[in-house]
Image (cartoon, rainbow, N blue to C red):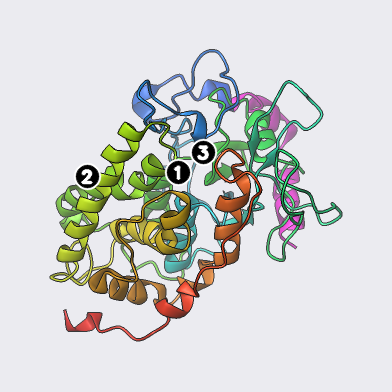
């Protein structure tokens, strides 16, 4: 079992090594230009993305706090690339974590980097503390009872799913506990997390950096080392498309959904609508975002488009456009969804469960809309090869 394999690895590390890195999370803030972390000297209050709101009611995402890097071929590197050393904490529901799952699958790193999938519905992370209302990702509890949402309404929602396992490293109940075991100071307990089981600490929790590491630093152990999703020849073009897709589409859906003023929503939905039309035109000329080659830019885009119709149109009020009514975008999504290794990373039930049951402020009774079968739509034939 995965749990036993990980425990065996942890036991193999000497107690001296374990103790010397017991406070690694705090020490990672020493050298900024080594991209270790952006932690504050003083721990911040626990928060979620819903708390990241500007003065005008606009959603303002805060950067990830853990920014170390796994290095291949550098003997002196703190985090050297090794098979079986690293673990991914992810959620099927989360688009940022889904990036890591897809990249891991396309590279064939399943035997190299283990994975634990957290449960889709956020719960209280300190349920015994009446003064701590934080909610977030929790681990599967096979012996647990179904529960309502965080304010006691809706559901009840299961405490375990097939494929969602308990934490194999610390036996933690929540992702918050994993972060706190690593002396986190940022206070935002997000996924994905790339975890070093030898040093017992978080390496990185920024998805855009994790997928670059998965693409390039583990080729010695990958089943598909020749798959390069971040080619040098396309770096400039990838940067150009990412520059407008991230703020207006990837993050744009959240800017719409988490806006707390009409002004903030109107600005976000206008930008998203314009970018959706721009994307539809671009994909009428190119097979993928940067031409004929599938890249990490496509990974980053696909995970948002996958959730657009089933979730964001309703939940985040992004109803000016849809994938189903955008022929080029729909066919593009079909091709990506049907690529070997992608479909198996998709769990639409958990995607919908997370969004509609985790934020009582947005959906008090956690009613999950039935919707149409979007995956069936994505399974239909496409003609992208003609481009």
Query: Is residue 84 visible to us here?
Result: no
| x and y percentages locating residue 207 in the rendered image | 43, 46
Give the residue at the far front of this rendering.
262
Residue 330 occupies which quadrant of the picture? bottom left
Q: Nearer the viewer, residue 277 or 189?
A: 277
Does residue 241 appear left or right of residue 301 in this picture?
left
Q: Secondary structure at mark 1?
A: loop
Q: Residue at the spot x=38%, y=66% of the render? A: 225
Indicate left or right for 15 with 55 as reference. right
Outermost bottom residue: 381
Q: Gap between marks 3 and 1, in whole Å?
A: 8 Å
Tag nearer the camera, 3 or 2:
2
Residue wearing tag 1: 70
Highlighted range, magenta: 1-24
Which is in the foreground here, disc 3 or disc 1? 3
Label 3 element class = strand
Residue bearing the label numbered 3: 203
Name the residue rendered at 16%, 69% in the picture: 286
Q: Residues within 10 Å of mark 2 (few under 14, many from 20)?
A: few
Q: Nearer the viewer, residue 102 or 35?
A: 102
Say which residue appears at 64% left-offset and 54% top-offset. 116
- 291 vs 4, left or right, is left
Residue that label 2 marks: 243
In three-dimensional space, the C-alpha distance between marks 1 and 2, rounded to whole angstroms, equals: 25 Å
């Amino acid at each position: 079992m995965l749990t036993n394999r990980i425990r065996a690895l942890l036991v193999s590390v000497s107690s001296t090594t374990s103790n010397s890195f017991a406070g690694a999370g705090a020490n990672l803030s020493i050298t900024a230009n080594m991209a270790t972390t952006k932690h504050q000297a003083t721990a911040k209050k626990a928060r979620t993305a819903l708390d990241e709101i500007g003065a005008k009611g606009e959603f303002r995402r805060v950067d990830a706090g853990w920014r170390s890097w796994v290095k291949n071929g550098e003997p002196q590197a703190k985090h050297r690339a090794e098979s079986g050393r690293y673990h991914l904490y992810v959620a099927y529901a989360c688009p940022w974590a889904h990036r890591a799952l897809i990249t891991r699958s396309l590279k064939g790193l399943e035997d190299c980097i283990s994975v634990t999938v957290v449960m889709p519905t956020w719960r209280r992370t300190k349920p015994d503390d009446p003064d701590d209302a934080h909610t977030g990702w929790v681990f599967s509890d096979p012996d647990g009872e179904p529960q309502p949402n965080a304010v006691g309404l809706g559901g009840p929602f299961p405490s375990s799913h097939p494929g969602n396992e308990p934490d194999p490293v610390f036996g933690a109940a929540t992702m918050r506990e994993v972060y706190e075991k690593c002396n986190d100071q940022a206070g935002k307990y997000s996924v994905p997390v790339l975890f070093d089981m030898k040093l017992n600490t978080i390496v990185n929790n920024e998805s855009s950096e994790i997928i670059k590491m998965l693409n390039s630093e583990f080729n010695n152990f990958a089943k598909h080392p020749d798959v390069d999703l971040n080619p040098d020849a396309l770096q400039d073009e990838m940067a150009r498309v990412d520059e407008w897709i991230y703020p207006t589409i990837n993050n744009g859906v959240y800017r719409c959904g988490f806006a707390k003023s009409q002004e903030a929503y109107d600005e976000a939905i206008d930008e998203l609508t314009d970018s959706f039309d721009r994307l539809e035109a671009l994909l009428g000329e190119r097979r993928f975002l940067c031409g004929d080659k599938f890249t990490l830019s496509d990974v980053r885009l696909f995970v948002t488009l996958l959730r657009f119709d089933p979730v964001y149109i309703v939940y985040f009020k992004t109803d000016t456009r849809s994938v189903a009514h955008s022929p080029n975008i729909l066919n593009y999504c079909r091709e990506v969804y049907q690529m070997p290794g992608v479909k198996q990373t998709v769990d639409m039930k958990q995607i919908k469960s997370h969004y509609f049951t985790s934020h009582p402020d947005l959906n008090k009774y956690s009613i999950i809309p039935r919707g149409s079968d979007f995956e069936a739509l994505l399974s239909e034939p496409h003609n992208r090869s003609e481009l």
